[in-house]
């Protein structure tokens, strides 16, 4: 999805959201305006003096405080996006999720294992999620983890798992009916 020129009547020109637009859409108007305000403040702070090359620790700390608030807002937006997943609905992966970014769980139970661990110990040849892979949403556990099954591996003994605020959630988009 492309970033629009305006959102909530506010120009998005020059603003780096560091998140895909389908996640930024989850922001409320107040949060959106707050994020832009923080971005403008943080981008105006230069912790290194261009003439001497010395770092100013107080400027650096101030900039990091703004960035921390922005990370919090993005995490909230990813959680809201994840809460929109519906059981037994098909989703499409719109960018590659490499195997070192994938977590899996044994089918029928909760818990998380790194995908590379299973492949390394010989527990199967499970691959990462490629672009245009189709997955079906299975369920959410008590911790808010999202469980998906890949359509081409429906009989696999493992399911793909994503944390509630995982950055990889932005790659999972609803499959549009045609």
Image (cartoon, helix red, strand yellow):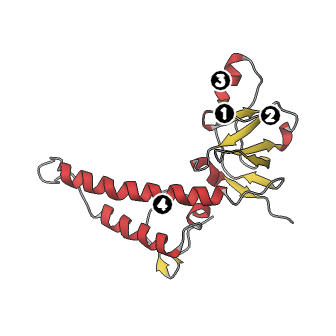
Q: Is residue 145 left or right of residue 47?
A: right
Disc 4 and disc 3 in contact, CB within 8 angstroms: no
> Could you give the CA–CA distance between mark 4 and mark 2, rounded to whole angstroms?
33 Å
Question: Circle 3 is placed at which residue position?
Answer: 117
> Could you give the CA–CA distance between mark 2 and mark 3, rounded to whole angstroms?
16 Å
Question: Circle 4 is placed at which residue position?
Answer: 73
Sequence-wise, the earlier of marks 3 and 1 is 1
Question: In the rendered image, is residue 12 in sight?
Answer: no
Disc 4 versus disc 3: nearer the observer: 4
**Label 4 element class:** helix
Which image quadrant for residue 148? top right
Tell me the number on the disc at residue 107: 2
Disc 3 versus disc 1: nearer the observer: 1
> Could you give the CA–CA distance between mark 4 and mark 3, rounded to whole angstroms?
32 Å
Q: Is residue 29 left or right of residue 128?
A: left
Question: In the rendered image, is residue 156 in sight?
Answer: yes
> Could you give the CA–CA distance between mark 4 and mark 1, rounded to whole angstroms?
26 Å
The structure residue drawn at horizontal position 48% and vertical position 69%, both measured from the top left corner, is 31
Question: Circle 1 is placed at which residue position?
Answer: 112
Disc 1 and disc 2 in contact, CB within 8 angstroms: no
Sequence-wise, the earlier of marks 2 and 3 is 2
Sequence-wise, the earlier of marks 4 and 2 is 4
Residue found farthest to the bottom? 9
Q: Is residue 39 left or right of residue 94?
A: left
**Label 1 packing within 10 angstroms: few (<14), some (14-19), many (20+):** some
Location of residue 151 in the rendering, given as x and y in whole percent from the top left corner: 84, 44
């Amino acid at each position: 999805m492309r970033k629009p020129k305006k959102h909530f009547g506010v120009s998005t020109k020059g603003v780096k959201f560091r998140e895909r637009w389908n996640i930024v859409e989850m922001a409320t108007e107040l949060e959106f305006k707050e994020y832009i305000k923080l971005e403008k403040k943080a981008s105006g702070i230069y912790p290194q003096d261009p003439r001497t090359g010395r770092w100013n620790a107080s400027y650096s700390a101030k900039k990091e405080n703004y960035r921390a608030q922005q990370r919090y807002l993005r995490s909230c937006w990813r959680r809201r996006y994840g809460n929109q997943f519906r059981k037994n609905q098909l989703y499409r992966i719109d960018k590659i999720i490499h195997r070192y970014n994938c977590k899996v769980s044994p089918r029928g139970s909760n818990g998380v294992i790194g995908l590379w661990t299973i492949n390394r110990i010989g527990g199967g040849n499970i691959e990462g999620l490629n672009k245009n892979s189709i997955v079906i949403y299975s369920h959410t556990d008590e911790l808010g983890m999202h469980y998906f099954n890949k359509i081409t591996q429906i009989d696999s003994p493992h399911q793909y798992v994503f944390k509630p605020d995982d950055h990889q959630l932005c790659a999972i988009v609803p499959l549009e009916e045609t």
